[in-house]
Amino acid sequence: MTKKKMLNYINENEDNFEHNIKSLANSRMDLNEEITDKVSEILKNVKEGGNESLFKYMEELDGIKNPSKNLFISQTDIKEAKAKCSEESLQALGLAKKRIEEFHLQQMPKDSLFSDDQKINIKTRWIPLESVGVYIPGGKASYPSSVLMTIIPAQVAGVKNIKATIPCPNNKIDPLVLAALDLCNIEEIYKIGGSHAIAALTWGTETISKVDIIIGPGNKWVAEAKKQVIGNVKIDMIAGPSEILIISDNYSNPEWVAADLIAQAEHDETAQAILITDDISFAKKVDECIRIQISQLSRSMIISESLKNNGYAIVVHNLSKSADIANTIAPEHLSILCKDYEIIEKEIINAGVIFTGVWTPEAMGDYIIGSSHVLPTNGMAKNYSGLSVFNFLRRQSTIMGERETIKTLGPPAVILAECEGLDAHANSIKLRLKD
């Protein structure tokens, strides 16, 4: 009896190969009008109704009873949560925090000064945003790592006012998430999830003050809400379900490749895991390794459903084609696990992050490497970068000229102003030229 394949196969030998690749790339961008309309309604209600509407959604959607008196995470809650965490897990969080801080500190840009022989001085200064709202994801799993990956870059950038919202279904929350928030010295923590959390952070309520930027990944409701509030508040990106694309040949251990694909698929049923290889027999080995490993994992049902819906093995004649495919898909995570990974890596321009070599599994980047794991999905790696200190900084220029500046640069500026029909602009310069 033939065993059922764990992955969906796309082969370059097929006539419709290019079409299938484009369809795969576009499939992540499907819109759900029902969600769009419902999110719009929630945002409008919280914007107009403030706490009253927010509390209603907390009861209905979060299962929080008596939300007006159960809105905050207290210091007592945090103390009790930390007592439930193992010393080993707290030490691991501490090490991750240290590495994330070190990496982002070296990202910080320096102020600069431009000057030229026209006596122009342009000073550029980097200024941190004043307030940040961090959405800590929940759902199928709990993510204390996301606390560190979102908050630490903001703190390194110099943001002073940071508040967090956390989905607390039926008033339950992972103790290690609270321990991570305490490690980052965050005291303003709200028991809110979903679109109503985004609304509260965007417009504020009688209790929650509005913020300058909202960051952090979430489910499709959160992603849609962040999309709709653009223009009212800055956001980091519209993050959807997790993705990984692995480029591999038979140089790699199929067990390791299978494990890396599974690691992404276990997030939820909408996660995407793709393998590109030039060896069909290797793809089949990976497929069988997936089958074996899944049977030993606690989230096997989620993984199986995820791979059934969004797991693919793309078989090409030559891995030289893999970079083009990867750039078309623009995955959140790209792992290059083949012998000549350096050659392929140079051709990749569209990926949230790239992991090269067999000793750098994507899962390490999720926790301990140092760069933020908040990355663009849904093909948005073509347009966005991963979260960094730059999300929390504004660049401001201060310009100063002298009399000589007007004498030399004023006349051509007048010409350009008059070409645009802006006489007042031209006159502003002409008056100084007469002096």
Image (cartoon, rainbow, N blue to C red):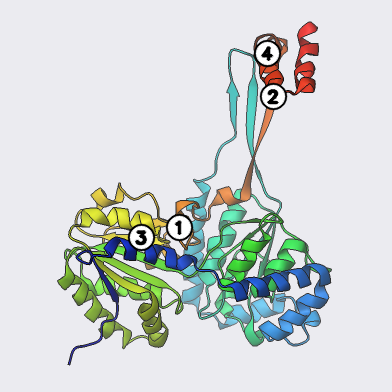
CB under 8 Å between callouts 3 and 4? no
Q: Quadrant of residue 39?
A: bottom right
Residue mark closest to the camera, 2 vs 4: 2
Answer whether residue 401 is visible to the viewer in this image: no
Earlier residue among tags 2 and 1? 1
SS type, badge 1: loop
Image coordinates of residue 419 in percent, x first then y, are 68, 20
The three-letter code of the residue at mark 2 reads: Glu
Question: Could you say which is closer to the camera, residue 128 or residue 182?
Answer: 128
Looking at the image, the residue that sits furthest to the bottom is 1
Mark carried by residue 405: 4
The three-letter code of the residue at mark 4 reads: Thr
Residue mark closest to the camera, 1 vs 4: 4
SS type, badge 4: helix
Question: Could you say which is closer to the camera, residue 334 or residue 183?
Answer: 334
SS type, badge 2: loop
Packing grade of label 2 (10 A; few <14, some 14-19, many >=20) is few
Q: CA distance from mark 2 to mark 4?
A: 22 Å
Looking at the image, the residue that sits furthest to the front is 15
SS type, badge 3: strand
Residue at 64% x, 26% y is 122
The answer to whether 161 is drawn above or below residue 423 in the figure is below
Image coordinates of residue 357 in percent, x first then y, are 27, 58
Packing grade of label 1 (10 A; few <14, some 14-19, many >=20) is many
Residue at 69% x, 56% y is 233
Q: CA distance from mark 3 to mark 4?
A: 50 Å
Earlier residue among tags 1 and 4? 1
Q: CA distance from mark 1 to mark 3?
A: 17 Å
Packing grade of label 3 (10 A; few <14, some 14-19, many >=20) is many
The answer to whether 68 is drawn above or below residue 378 in the figure is below
Q: CA distance from mark 2 to mark 1?
A: 50 Å
Image coordinates of residue 332 in percent, x first then y, are 43, 61
